[in-house]
Image: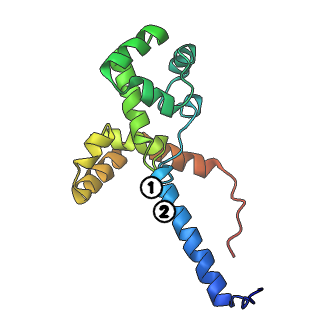
């Protein structure tokens, strides 16, 4: 016997779609790492990783900041990467710390340098910070960071093309 189904109302359809979407977002956030930041090709962060370092890391088959962190997170792995790349283990530790900070959504190369200027060199350092005190440290570091002067100078040299009226 065939049963008749009433068509869904717009509200029922919307609620069903919203529930499905919310479930999918929750799944991705919990299980697929959706809250993590994108990783960079090591050649795309020249302020953090020099071209000489990039060449040596490529030789060791390291192409992204995620791979760098994975291959330099532990002391024994850094030692192996140092041998494969020709970079000193201490230098690899500094690069790994930078890659570690890049895992935070919204943090890019410039912010990593600002964090370092404020005394924070890794996510382990960042979790120990008090937000207000860290803001003061970042603000003070920002005053001495030559990047701001450079950006202002560059902006002054650009022709103004955007009409805002």
Assign a secondary structure to mark 1. Answer: helix
Residue drawn 48% across the image and 40% down it: 109
Q: Does residue 90 sit above or below 129 in this rendering? A: above
Q: Work out whether residue 160 can be spotted.
A: yes
Residue drawn 49% across the image and 27% down it: 49
Rendered-image quadrant of the N terminus:
bottom right
Residue drawn 44% across the image and 43% down it: 103
Q: Does residue 116 sit above or below 162 in this rendering? A: above
Relative side of 77 to 55, left or right: left
Residue drawn 40% across the image and 12% down it: 80
Q: Nearer the viewer, residue 147 or 65?
A: 65
Assign a secondary structure to mark 2. Answer: helix
Percent from the top left, x then y, of residue 162? 70, 63
Find residue 30 and name its label: 1
Q: Which residue is mark 2?
A: 26
Percent from the top left, x then y, of residue 85? 48, 12
Structure colour scheme:
rainbow
Mark 1 Cα shell of 10 Å, populated few (<14), some (14-19), many (≥20): few
Q: Does residue 108 sit above or below 86 in this rendering? A: below
As measured in the structure, the alpha-carbon distance from the residue carrying label 2 to the one carrying label 1 is: 6 Å
Q: Work out whether residue 47 can be spotted.
A: no
Find residue 113 and name its label: none
Percent from the top left, x then y, of residue 26? 48, 62
Q: Contact, CB < 8 Å: mark 2 with mark 1?
A: yes
Q: Give the quarter of the image for residue 40.
A: top right
Q: Nearer the viewer, residue 71 or 164?
A: 71
Q: Give the quarter of the image for residue 165.
A: bottom right
Q: Nearer the viewer, residue 56 or 69?
A: 69
Q: How many numbered callouts? A: 2
Q: Nearer the viewer, residue 48 or 89?
A: 89
Percent from the top left, x then y, of residue 59? 56, 13
Toward the front, the furthest residue is 1
């Amino acid at each position: 016997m065939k049963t008749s189904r009433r068509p869904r109302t717009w509200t029922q359809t919307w609620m069903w779609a919203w529930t499905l979407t919310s479930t999918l977002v929750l799944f991705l956030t919990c299980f697929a790492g959706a809250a993590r930041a994108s990783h960079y090709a090591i050649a795309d962060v020249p302020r953090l990783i020099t071209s000489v370092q990039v060449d040596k890391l490529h030789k060791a088959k390291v192409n992204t900041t995620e791979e760098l962190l994975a291959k330099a997170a532990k002391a024994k792995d850094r030692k192996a990467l140092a041998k494969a790349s020709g970079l000193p283990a201490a230098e690899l530790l500094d690069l790994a710390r930078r890659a570690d900070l890049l895992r935070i959504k919204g943090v890019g190369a410039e912010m990593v340098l600002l964090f370092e200027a404020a005394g924070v060199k890794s996510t382990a350092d960042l979790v120990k910070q008090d937000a207000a005190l860290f803001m003061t440290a970042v603000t003070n570091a920002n005053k001495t960071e030559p990047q701001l002067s450079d950006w202002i100078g560059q902006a002054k040299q650009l022709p103004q093309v955007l009409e805002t009226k």
